[in-house]
Image: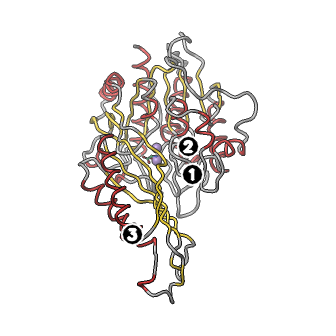
Amino acid sequence: MHLSGDRLLDDLVKLGEIGAREESGRTRLVLTPEDFEARRFLITRMKEARMQVRVDQVGNIIGRRGNSTKDDLPVLAFGSHIDTVPSAGTLDGCYGVLAGLEVIRTLNDERAETRHPLELISFSNEEGVRFPMMIGSKVASGIMDLETAYELRDNAGITYRQALEAGGLLEGALVAARRTPGEIGAWLELHIEQGPILESERLKIGVVESIVGLVHMLVTIQGRAGHAGTTPMNARRDPMLAAAQIILEVNKIGRELSRSSVGTVGLLNVQPGAMNVIPGKVEVGIDLRDTSGERIDQGMQKVRSAIDAVCKKLGLEYTTRERARLAPQPMSRKVMGSIELAARRLGASYKVMPSGAGHDTQNMARICETGMIFVPSKGGVSHAPDEWTDPTDLALGANVLLETLLELDRT
Ligand code: HGY
Ligand code: MN
Ligand code: MN
Protein backbone atom coordinates (compact mmCIF):
# COMPACT_ATOMS: atom_id res chain seq x y z
CA MET A 1 0.00 0.00 0.00
CA HIS A 2 1.41 3.37 -0.95
CA LEU A 3 0.42 6.91 -0.10
CA SER A 4 0.84 9.66 -2.68
CA GLY A 5 1.94 12.99 -1.22
CA ASP A 6 -0.16 15.21 -3.51
CA ARG A 7 -3.28 15.62 -1.39
CA LEU A 8 -1.15 15.99 1.73
CA LEU A 9 0.88 18.82 0.19
CA ASP A 10 -2.27 20.51 -1.04
CA ASP A 11 -3.82 20.34 2.44
CA LEU A 12 -0.64 21.69 4.06
CA VAL A 13 -0.76 24.73 1.80
CA LYS A 14 -4.48 25.30 2.49
CA LEU A 15 -4.19 24.94 6.26
CA GLY A 16 -1.09 27.16 6.15
CA GLU A 17 -3.18 29.95 4.62
CA ILE A 18 -5.34 30.16 7.73
CA GLY A 19 -4.02 32.95 9.97
CA ALA A 20 -1.33 33.85 7.42
CA ARG A 21 0.05 37.36 7.12
CA GLU A 22 2.44 38.45 4.43
CA GLU A 23 6.10 38.25 5.49
CA SER A 24 5.34 36.90 8.96
CA GLY A 25 4.11 33.34 8.47
CA ARG A 26 0.88 32.32 10.15
CA THR A 27 -0.34 32.77 13.72
CA ARG A 28 -3.00 30.46 15.11
CA LEU A 29 -2.86 30.68 18.87
CA VAL A 30 -5.22 28.20 20.46
CA LEU A 31 -8.93 29.07 20.67
CA THR A 32 -8.61 32.29 18.65
CA PRO A 33 -10.71 32.91 15.49
CA GLU A 34 -7.80 31.59 13.36
CA ASP A 35 -7.64 28.36 15.38
CA PHE A 36 -11.42 27.94 15.12
CA GLU A 37 -11.18 28.29 11.34
CA ALA A 38 -8.39 25.70 11.22
CA ARG A 39 -10.51 23.35 13.35
CA ARG A 40 -13.42 23.69 10.92
CA PHE A 41 -11.08 22.95 8.02
CA LEU A 42 -9.80 19.78 9.70
CA ILE A 43 -13.24 18.54 10.78
CA THR A 44 -14.59 19.02 7.24
CA ARG A 45 -11.69 17.02 5.83
CA MET A 46 -12.15 14.27 8.43
CA LYS A 47 -15.83 13.98 7.60
CA GLU A 48 -15.07 13.87 3.88
CA ALA A 49 -12.82 10.91 4.73
CA ARG A 50 -15.88 9.27 6.36
CA MET A 51 -14.51 9.52 9.88
CA GLN A 52 -16.75 9.85 12.94
CA VAL A 53 -15.64 13.11 14.48
CA ARG A 54 -15.94 14.16 18.10
CA VAL A 55 -14.56 17.10 20.05
CA ASP A 56 -13.88 16.37 23.71
CA GLN A 57 -14.20 18.49 26.87
CA VAL A 58 -10.81 20.21 26.36
CA GLY A 59 -11.18 20.78 22.63
CA ASN A 60 -9.21 17.81 21.30
CA ILE A 61 -10.51 16.79 17.86
CA ILE A 62 -10.79 13.04 17.40
CA GLY A 63 -11.66 11.37 14.10
CA ARG A 64 -12.36 7.65 14.21
CA ARG A 65 -12.27 5.29 11.28
CA GLY A 66 -15.02 2.75 11.67
CA ASN A 67 -13.76 -0.04 9.43
CA SER A 68 -11.98 -2.25 11.94
CA THR A 69 -12.60 -5.96 12.13
CA LYS A 70 -12.18 -6.10 15.92
CA ASP A 71 -13.78 -3.00 17.30
CA ASP A 72 -13.09 -4.06 20.89
CA LEU A 73 -9.29 -4.06 20.41
CA PRO A 74 -7.39 -1.06 21.80
CA VAL A 75 -7.29 1.97 19.51
CA LEU A 76 -4.25 2.76 17.39
CA ALA A 77 -4.06 6.54 17.65
CA PHE A 78 -1.93 9.03 15.78
CA GLY A 79 -1.82 12.74 15.00
CA SER A 80 -0.32 15.95 16.40
CA HIS A 81 -1.62 19.55 16.69
CA ILE A 82 -2.76 22.44 14.47
CA ASP A 83 -2.27 25.40 16.81
CA THR A 84 0.90 27.42 16.18
CA VAL A 85 3.42 29.73 17.80
CA PRO A 86 3.35 33.37 16.57
CA SER A 87 4.70 33.72 12.99
CA ALA A 88 4.96 29.99 12.43
CA GLY A 89 5.72 27.83 9.41
CA THR A 90 3.27 25.38 7.85
CA LEU A 91 4.63 22.09 9.17
CA ASP A 92 5.02 22.00 12.97
CA GLY A 93 2.11 19.83 14.13
CA CYS A 94 0.05 20.29 10.95
CA TYR A 95 2.23 17.80 9.10
CA GLY A 96 1.47 15.00 11.59
CA VAL A 97 -2.27 15.70 11.57
CA LEU A 98 -2.65 16.03 7.80
CA ALA A 99 -0.37 13.05 7.10
CA GLY A 100 -2.61 11.06 9.46
CA LEU A 101 -5.62 12.20 7.45
CA GLU A 102 -3.91 11.09 4.26
CA VAL A 103 -3.19 7.68 5.83
CA ILE A 104 -6.93 7.28 6.46
CA ARG A 105 -7.79 8.39 2.91
CA THR A 106 -5.27 5.93 1.49
CA LEU A 107 -6.76 3.07 3.53
CA ASN A 108 -10.22 4.13 2.29
CA ASP A 109 -9.05 4.22 -1.34
CA GLU A 110 -7.62 0.74 -0.94
CA ARG A 111 -10.77 -0.44 0.87
CA ALA A 112 -8.38 -1.77 3.51
CA GLU A 113 -9.62 -2.98 6.87
CA THR A 114 -7.52 -2.89 10.01
CA ARG A 115 -7.99 -5.08 13.06
CA HIS A 116 -7.72 -2.18 15.51
CA PRO A 117 -9.92 0.91 15.38
CA LEU A 118 -7.91 3.91 14.17
CA GLU A 119 -8.18 7.38 15.65
CA LEU A 120 -6.65 10.56 14.28
CA ILE A 121 -6.24 13.10 17.11
CA SER A 122 -5.47 16.79 16.88
CA PHE A 123 -4.57 17.85 20.42
CA SER A 124 -5.69 21.24 21.65
CA ASN A 125 -3.16 23.85 22.82
CA GLU A 126 0.09 22.03 22.17
CA GLU A 127 2.20 25.13 21.77
CA GLY A 128 1.38 26.76 25.05
CA VAL A 129 1.77 30.34 23.89
CA ARG A 130 -1.60 31.63 25.05
CA PHE A 131 -2.18 29.05 27.83
CA PRO A 132 0.37 26.74 29.51
CA MET A 133 1.61 23.99 27.20
CA MET A 134 -0.21 20.86 26.07
CA ILE A 135 -3.49 21.07 27.97
CA GLY A 136 -5.20 18.68 25.53
CA SER A 137 -2.83 15.76 25.92
CA LYS A 138 -2.28 16.39 29.62
CA VAL A 139 -5.98 15.99 30.35
CA ALA A 140 -6.40 13.08 27.90
CA SER A 141 -3.58 11.21 29.65
CA GLY A 142 -4.69 12.08 33.18
CA ILE A 143 -1.61 14.19 33.99
CA MET A 144 -3.86 17.22 34.54
CA ASP A 145 -7.44 17.11 35.75
CA LEU A 146 -10.22 18.82 33.87
CA GLU A 147 -11.00 21.41 36.55
CA THR A 148 -7.36 22.56 36.70
CA ALA A 149 -7.30 22.86 32.91
CA TYR A 150 -10.52 24.87 32.83
CA GLU A 151 -9.16 27.41 35.35
CA LEU A 152 -5.88 28.16 33.53
CA ARG A 153 -5.80 31.76 32.33
CA ASP A 154 -4.27 33.64 29.44
CA ASN A 155 -2.61 37.06 29.85
CA ALA A 156 -5.95 38.82 29.50
CA GLY A 157 -7.38 36.77 32.39
CA ILE A 158 -9.61 34.63 30.15
CA THR A 159 -9.89 31.06 31.42
CA TYR A 160 -9.40 28.06 29.18
CA ARG A 161 -13.05 27.16 29.80
CA GLN A 162 -14.20 30.63 28.69
CA ALA A 163 -12.03 30.38 25.58
CA LEU A 164 -13.61 27.01 24.72
CA GLU A 165 -17.06 28.49 25.30
CA ALA A 166 -16.29 31.46 23.05
CA GLY A 167 -15.73 29.00 20.21
CA GLY A 168 -18.94 27.12 20.97
CA LEU A 169 -16.91 24.07 21.99
CA LEU A 170 -18.77 23.41 25.23
CA GLU A 171 -22.24 23.19 23.71
CA GLY A 172 -24.28 20.01 23.59
CA ALA A 173 -23.32 16.61 24.95
CA LEU A 174 -19.63 16.61 25.83
CA VAL A 175 -17.25 13.75 25.24
CA ALA A 176 -14.96 12.87 28.18
CA ALA A 177 -11.40 14.06 27.53
CA ARG A 178 -9.70 11.59 29.87
CA ARG A 179 -8.95 8.34 28.06
CA THR A 180 -9.64 5.22 30.09
CA PRO A 181 -6.77 2.81 30.84
CA GLY A 182 -6.32 0.26 28.07
CA GLU A 183 -8.50 2.20 25.63
CA ILE A 184 -5.53 3.27 23.48
CA GLY A 185 -2.93 0.64 22.60
CA ALA A 186 -0.38 2.88 20.94
CA TRP A 187 0.09 6.52 19.95
CA LEU A 188 2.27 7.61 17.02
CA GLU A 189 3.28 11.17 16.16
CA LEU A 190 4.88 12.05 12.85
CA HIS A 191 6.66 15.42 13.04
CA ILE A 192 9.36 17.49 11.42
CA GLU A 193 12.64 17.22 13.32
CA GLN A 194 12.87 20.99 13.95
CA GLY A 195 16.64 20.59 14.30
CA PRO A 196 19.63 20.08 11.99
CA ILE A 197 20.68 16.47 12.62
CA LEU A 198 18.90 14.46 9.90
CA GLU A 199 19.71 16.99 7.20
CA SER A 200 23.37 17.26 8.15
CA GLU A 201 23.75 13.47 8.24
CA ARG A 202 21.75 13.10 5.00
CA LEU A 203 19.27 10.75 6.63
CA LYS A 204 15.55 10.58 5.83
CA ILE A 205 13.89 9.33 8.99
CA GLY A 206 14.43 9.84 12.72
CA VAL A 207 13.20 7.15 15.08
CA VAL A 208 12.74 9.07 18.32
CA GLU A 209 14.07 7.27 21.40
CA SER A 210 13.34 9.96 24.00
CA ILE A 211 11.84 13.44 24.37
CA VAL A 212 13.42 16.15 26.52
CA GLY A 213 11.77 17.55 29.61
CA LEU A 214 11.23 21.24 30.19
CA VAL A 215 10.19 23.88 32.66
CA HIS A 216 8.60 27.21 31.79
CA MET A 217 8.96 29.84 34.48
CA LEU A 218 7.68 33.41 34.54
CA VAL A 219 9.63 35.94 36.67
CA THR A 220 8.01 39.28 37.51
CA ILE A 221 10.44 41.98 38.62
CA GLN A 222 9.05 45.08 40.26
CA GLY A 223 10.93 48.40 40.05
CA ARG A 224 9.90 52.04 40.00
CA ALA A 225 8.79 53.70 36.78
CA GLY A 226 10.34 57.08 36.12
CA HIS A 227 11.49 59.69 33.64
CA ALA A 228 14.34 58.46 31.42
CA GLY A 229 15.74 61.95 31.02
CA THR A 230 15.57 63.37 34.52
CA THR A 231 16.10 60.46 36.92
CA PRO A 232 19.80 60.34 37.87
CA MET A 233 21.47 57.02 37.10
CA ASN A 234 22.16 56.33 40.78
CA ALA A 235 18.57 57.02 41.83
CA ARG A 236 16.86 54.35 39.71
CA ARG A 237 15.17 51.05 40.50
CA ASP A 238 15.23 49.63 37.00
CA PRO A 239 13.89 46.05 36.61
CA MET A 240 15.19 45.92 33.04
CA LEU A 241 18.73 45.74 34.39
CA ALA A 242 17.80 42.65 36.38
CA ALA A 243 16.10 41.14 33.32
CA ALA A 244 19.24 41.68 31.25
CA GLN A 245 21.41 39.88 33.79
CA ILE A 246 18.88 37.05 34.19
CA ILE A 247 18.87 36.55 30.42
CA LEU A 248 22.65 36.15 30.43
CA GLU A 249 22.50 33.74 33.37
CA VAL A 250 19.87 31.54 31.68
CA ASN A 251 22.02 31.39 28.57
CA LYS A 252 25.06 30.41 30.66
CA ILE A 253 23.14 27.72 32.57
CA GLY A 254 21.76 26.36 29.27
CA ARG A 255 25.31 26.11 27.92
CA GLU A 256 26.90 24.62 31.00
CA LEU A 257 24.35 22.35 32.67
CA SER A 258 24.93 19.35 30.38
CA ARG A 259 25.46 18.42 26.76
CA SER A 260 21.71 18.18 26.21
CA SER A 261 20.63 21.29 28.10
CA VAL A 262 19.30 24.49 26.50
CA GLY A 263 18.12 27.67 28.15
CA THR A 264 16.11 30.45 26.51
CA VAL A 265 14.42 33.71 27.39
CA GLY A 266 11.92 34.19 24.55
CA LEU A 267 9.46 36.43 26.34
CA LEU A 268 9.95 39.85 27.81
CA ASN A 269 7.03 41.97 28.87
CA VAL A 270 8.07 45.51 29.71
CA GLN A 271 5.68 47.84 31.52
CA PRO A 272 4.71 50.45 30.53
CA GLY A 273 7.05 49.99 27.53
CA ALA A 274 8.24 53.31 26.14
CA MET A 275 11.69 54.56 25.19
CA ASN A 276 11.57 57.53 27.50
CA VAL A 277 10.23 55.67 30.55
CA ILE A 278 12.31 53.64 33.01
CA PRO A 279 10.24 50.44 33.26
CA GLY A 280 8.14 49.93 36.37
CA LYS A 281 7.79 46.19 35.89
CA VAL A 282 9.35 43.53 33.67
CA GLU A 283 8.24 39.95 33.12
CA VAL A 284 10.81 37.42 31.91
CA GLY A 285 9.71 34.07 30.43
CA ILE A 286 12.30 31.30 30.87
CA ASP A 287 12.41 27.94 29.01
CA LEU A 288 14.92 25.37 30.34
CA ARG A 289 15.25 21.86 28.88
CA ASP A 290 17.34 18.76 29.43
CA THR A 291 17.07 15.01 28.81
CA SER A 292 17.30 14.43 32.59
CA GLY A 293 14.56 15.54 34.97
CA GLU A 294 17.07 15.75 37.84
CA ARG A 295 19.30 18.07 35.86
CA ILE A 296 16.31 20.27 35.02
CA ASP A 297 15.68 20.60 38.76
CA GLN A 298 19.37 21.41 39.37
CA GLY A 299 19.32 23.92 36.51
CA MET A 300 16.16 25.59 37.81
CA GLN A 301 17.77 25.82 41.25
CA LYS A 302 20.68 27.68 39.63
CA VAL A 303 18.24 29.92 37.76
CA ARG A 304 16.40 30.74 41.00
CA SER A 305 19.65 31.51 42.84
CA ALA A 306 20.77 33.77 40.00
CA ILE A 307 17.44 35.65 40.00
CA ASP A 308 17.62 36.10 43.76
CA ALA A 309 21.22 37.35 43.69
CA VAL A 310 20.61 39.76 40.81
CA CYS A 311 17.44 41.25 42.30
CA LYS A 312 18.95 41.56 45.79
CA LYS A 313 21.98 43.37 44.38
CA LEU A 314 19.72 45.82 42.55
CA GLY A 315 17.28 46.18 45.46
CA LEU A 316 14.30 44.87 43.47
CA GLU A 317 11.32 42.78 44.55
CA TYR A 318 10.42 39.80 42.40
CA THR A 319 8.07 36.82 42.19
CA THR A 320 8.41 33.58 40.21
CA ARG A 321 5.69 31.31 38.89
CA GLU A 322 6.19 27.95 37.22
CA ARG A 323 3.92 27.98 34.17
CA ALA A 324 4.44 24.53 32.71
CA ARG A 325 6.47 21.37 33.27
CA LEU A 326 6.99 18.32 31.08
CA ALA A 327 8.85 15.21 32.16
CA PRO A 328 11.56 13.74 29.89
CA GLN A 329 10.16 10.58 28.35
CA PRO A 330 11.67 7.50 26.68
CA MET A 331 9.66 6.00 23.81
CA SER A 332 8.35 2.42 23.67
CA ARG A 333 10.91 -0.11 22.38
CA LYS A 334 8.14 -1.99 20.63
CA VAL A 335 6.90 1.04 18.70
CA MET A 336 10.48 2.10 17.88
CA GLY A 337 11.07 -1.39 16.47
CA SER A 338 7.96 -1.11 14.29
CA ILE A 339 9.10 2.28 12.95
CA GLU A 340 12.57 0.90 12.15
CA LEU A 341 11.01 -2.06 10.37
CA ALA A 342 8.77 0.27 8.38
CA ALA A 343 11.72 2.49 7.39
CA ARG A 344 13.71 -0.54 6.26
CA ARG A 345 10.80 -1.88 4.23
CA LEU A 346 10.53 1.46 2.46
CA GLY A 347 14.29 1.65 1.88
CA ALA A 348 14.54 4.83 3.96
CA SER A 349 17.79 5.68 5.75
CA TYR A 350 17.18 6.36 9.44
CA LYS A 351 18.74 6.94 12.81
CA VAL A 352 17.59 6.57 16.38
CA MET A 353 17.68 10.02 17.98
CA PRO A 354 16.31 12.18 20.81
CA SER A 355 13.78 14.99 20.41
CA GLY A 356 14.81 18.43 21.67
CA ALA A 357 11.30 19.78 21.17
CA GLY A 358 8.42 18.88 23.44
CA HIS A 359 5.49 16.90 22.02
CA ASP A 360 2.07 15.64 23.14
CA THR A 361 3.60 12.18 22.78
CA GLN A 362 5.46 12.58 26.09
CA ASN A 363 2.13 12.94 27.87
CA MET A 364 0.48 10.09 25.98
CA ALA A 365 3.32 7.84 27.17
CA ARG A 366 1.61 7.79 30.54
CA ILE A 367 -1.30 5.74 29.19
CA CYS A 368 -0.03 3.80 26.17
CA GLU A 369 2.96 2.75 24.10
CA THR A 370 4.28 5.71 22.15
CA GLY A 371 6.58 6.47 19.25
CA MET A 372 7.61 9.41 17.08
CA ILE A 373 8.80 9.59 13.49
CA PHE A 374 10.90 12.57 12.38
CA VAL A 375 11.62 13.88 8.88
CA PRO A 376 14.43 16.37 8.09
CA SER A 377 14.00 20.12 8.55
CA LYS A 378 15.84 22.36 6.09
CA GLY A 379 18.57 24.18 7.98
CA GLY A 380 17.09 22.80 11.21
CA VAL A 381 14.67 25.75 11.24
CA SER A 382 11.31 25.63 13.03
CA HIS A 383 9.06 27.97 15.04
CA ALA A 384 9.78 30.38 12.17
CA PRO A 385 7.99 31.15 8.87
CA ASP A 386 10.72 29.58 6.71
CA GLU A 387 10.34 26.11 8.24
CA TRP A 388 10.64 23.74 5.26
CA THR A 389 10.92 20.05 4.41
CA ASP A 390 11.38 18.64 0.92
CA PRO A 391 7.98 17.36 -0.37
CA THR A 392 9.53 13.98 -1.19
CA ASP A 393 10.63 13.67 2.43
CA LEU A 394 7.16 14.64 3.64
CA ALA A 395 5.61 11.90 1.50
CA LEU A 396 8.19 9.36 2.68
CA GLY A 397 7.52 10.21 6.33
CA ALA A 398 3.78 9.76 5.77
CA ASN A 399 4.44 6.36 4.20
CA VAL A 400 6.55 5.36 7.20
CA LEU A 401 3.60 6.34 9.41
CA LEU A 402 1.22 4.22 7.30
CA GLU A 403 3.59 1.25 7.26
CA THR A 404 4.23 1.51 11.02
CA LEU A 405 0.50 1.56 11.74
CA LEU A 406 -0.05 -1.50 9.56
CA GLU A 407 2.79 -3.25 11.39
CA LEU A 408 1.37 -2.36 14.82
CA ASP A 409 -2.06 -3.49 13.61
CA ARG A 410 -0.70 -6.97 12.93
CA THR A 411 0.54 -7.47 16.48
O1 HGY B 1 8.09 24.16 22.54
C1 HGY B 1 8.05 23.01 22.11
O2 HGY B 1 8.94 22.20 22.27
C2 HGY B 1 6.88 22.58 21.29
O3 HGY B 1 7.13 22.94 19.97
N1 HGY B 1 5.66 23.10 21.70
MN1 MN C 1 4.84 20.49 17.22
MN1 MN D 1 6.03 23.80 18.11
Residue type (three-letter) at the residue carrying disc 1: Arg
Report the residue marked by disc 2: 125
Position of 188 with respect to 276 (left or right) is left
Q: Secondary structure at mark 3?
A: helix
Residue type (three-letter) at the residue carrying disc 3: Ala
Position of 347 with respect to 272 (left or right) is left
Report the residue marked by disc 3: 244
Mark 1 or mark 3: whose residue is earlier in sequence:
1
Report the residue marked by disc 1: 130
Position of 72 with respect to 332 (left or right) is right
- Residue, x 48% and y 58% (percent of image)? 319
Mark 1 or mark 2: whose residue is earlier in sequence:
2
Residue 16 image label: none
Which quadrant, please, contains the C terminus?
Answer: top left
Q: Residue furthest bottom?
A: 230
- Residue, x 43% and y 36% (percent of image)? 190
Image coordinates for residue 279, horizontal then vertical, percent: 51, 74
Label pair 2/3, CB-CB below 8 angstroms:
no
How crowded is the residue under tag 3: few (<14 C-alpha within 10 Å), some, or many (20+)? few
Label pair 1/2, CB-CB below 8 angstroms:
yes
